[in-house]
Image (cartoon, grey):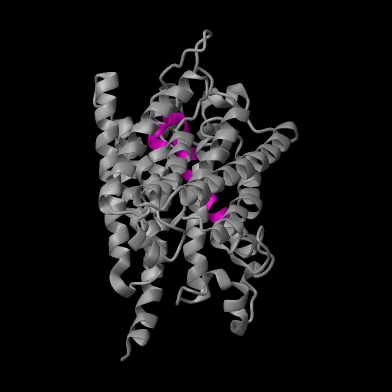
């Protein structure tokens, strides 16, 4: 059997496996966010990940995939909604994905998993005080008019892709978008009750289960191999292994760097800081994983871990209550990761991927760094404006935030009518009377 025939059988399975790994990141987000928030909201936090993936599945199928990858113009895709495309027209309508030798259904499933991750990040900024109804409306609109527009600009044949922007697996398309949306939501919702004192000093509102958070991050680390290595969408030449290598090296460096800087600054080897370092490094290397040498991936990951540690402290001191540090971890690290290729993109890897130009440190000049900067600014401005408009309209119409009484009681009970940990949070007297 010829190589083309073998690849035609193996590549679809490889992409399906990669999609499952990325989808499994929803488990990681559930554990991380539930563990990092308080017990009275644990069931709600975990359950909304199921809502998130279900909502994205329908909305991305209906319009998001077409807006992202469909034939259109430099700003938006206009065809391919609901995957309603004649078989002989698929490569024309979705020309931006025609390079991948897998069925359209698998291309959709793989890209769907990315959109779901971006929304999961955005919803982190709503944690512990937002109405469930706001999740539904914002989630649907994010999947149709926010995420796919930037996706089209970079990956769907849009103006940033035409400029040669390097974002292999989504530091900007997935993570910066989610981080910016989370920041806008955090600012419009305001801090959680009790987060700040009267003189604006932050109080510690610790998550209820650090073990959950650790397991969640490990699940995300594993799932990220589907995210980055899977973006090759082929096993040909084994390049996916190289992408996996740079991903893992960066992540390890981020974990150690964040742990060490926390140890120096706080006097303790803070586990939360280490976990944020892991995630920040994963976010940062997502853009660069196919363009940089292994030594550069270590630098990118370490810098991401350190930057995220200091920015998370800075934003909290400025009165911004971001319960799971979504903007620092995904927004700031997403910016750094996207810009990093402008410094570190290797000529041999740029030639292999045929995307953009070599970075500044390899004699490529300022061109690629300029392109990356334009991409970051363009995406950030668009997402910030559209997210603000949507959320502000929701705030003045249906409302974004639960009542103070509901927030104090916990969203498990106020939104779902049952605690995630009923034995711990219901009154012992009430339990005794119920039993009698």
Image height of 155 relative to 103, above or below: above
Residue visible at 69% across and 41% down? 390
Residue visible at 57% across and 40% down? 181
Q: 355 left or right of 3?
A: right
Image height of 246 relative to 135, above or below: below
Quarter placement of the N terminus: bottom left
Residue visible at 28% across and 27% down? 261
Residue 35 covered by magenta stretch? yes
State the residue in front, 203 or 46: 203
Q: What span is colored magenta in the figure?
A: 34-56
Residue 367 covered by magenta stretch? no
Q: Is residue 313 visible?
A: yes
Residue 169 placed where, x, y %? 44, 56
Q: Residue furthest top?
A: 199
Image height of 434 relative to 115, above or below: above
Magenta stretch, main secondary structure, is helix
Residue 189 placed where, x, y %? 61, 29
State the residue in front, 23 or 257: 257
Q: Is residue 398 visible?
A: no
Q: 291 left or right of 262?
A: right
Quarter placement of the C terminus: top left
Q: How many labels does the image show?
A: 0
State the residue in front, 426 or 69: 69
Image height of 76 relative to 405, above or below: below
Q: Which residue lies furthest to the bottom in this view?
A: 1
Q: Which residue lies furthest to the right in this view?
A: 397
State the residue in front, 73 or 402: 73
Residue 133 placed where, x, y %? 64, 41
Residue 45 placed where, x, y %? 48, 39
């Amino acid at each position: 059997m010829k190589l083309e025939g073998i690849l035609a059988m193996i590549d679809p399975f490889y992409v399906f496996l990669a999609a499952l790994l990325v989808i499994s990141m929803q488990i990681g987000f559930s554990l991380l966010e539930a563990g990092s928030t308080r017990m009275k909201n644990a069931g709600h936090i975990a359950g909304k990940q199921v809502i998130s993936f279900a909502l994205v599945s329908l909305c991305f199928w209906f319009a998001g995939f077409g807006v992202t990858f469909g034939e259109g113009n430099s700003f938006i895709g206009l065809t391919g909604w609901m995957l309603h495309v004649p078989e002989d027209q698929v490569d024309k309508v979705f020309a931006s994905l025609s390079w991948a030798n897998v069925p359209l259904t698998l291309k959709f499933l793989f890209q769907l998993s990315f959109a779901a991750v971006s929304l999961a990040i955005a919803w982190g900024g709503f944690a512990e005080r937002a109405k469930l109804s706001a999740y539904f409306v914002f989630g649907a609109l994010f999947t149709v008019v926010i995420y796919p527009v930037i996706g089209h600009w970079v990956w769907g044949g849009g103006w940033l892709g035409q400029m040669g922007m390097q974002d292999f697996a989504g530091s900007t398309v997935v993570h910066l978008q989610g981080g910016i949306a989370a920041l806008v939501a955090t600012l419009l919702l305001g801090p959680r009750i009790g987060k700040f004192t009267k003189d604006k000093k932050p109080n510690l509102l610790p998550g209820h289960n650090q073990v959950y958070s650790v397991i969640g991050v490990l699940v995300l680390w594993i799932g990220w191999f589907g995210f980055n290595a899977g973006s090759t969408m082929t096993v040909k030449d084994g390049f996916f292994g190289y992408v996996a290598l740079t991903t893992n090296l960066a992540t390890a460096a981020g974990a150690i760097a964040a742990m060490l800087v926390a140890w120096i600054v706080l006097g303790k080897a803070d586990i939360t800081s280490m976990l944020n370092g892991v995630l920040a490094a994963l976010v940062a290397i997502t853009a660069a994983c196919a363009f940089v040498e292994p030594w550069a991936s270590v630098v990118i990951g370490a810098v991401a871990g350190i930057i995220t540690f200091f920015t998370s402290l800075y934003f909290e001191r400025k009165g911004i209550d971001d319960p799971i540090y979504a903007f620092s971890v995904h927004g700031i690290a997403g910016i750094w990761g996207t810009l990093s290729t402008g410094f570190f993109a290797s000529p041999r890897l740029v030639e292999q991927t045929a995307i953009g130009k070599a970075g500044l440190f390899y004699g490529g000049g300022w061109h690629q760094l300029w392109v990356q900067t334009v991409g970051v600014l363009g995406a950030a401005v668009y997402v910030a404006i559209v997210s603000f408009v949507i959320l502000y309209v929701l705030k003045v119409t249906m409302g974004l935030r639960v009542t103070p009484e509901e927030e104090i009681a916990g969203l498990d009970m106020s939104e779902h009518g049952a605690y995630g940990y009923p034995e711990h949070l219901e009154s012992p007297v009430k339990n005794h009377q119920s039993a009698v």
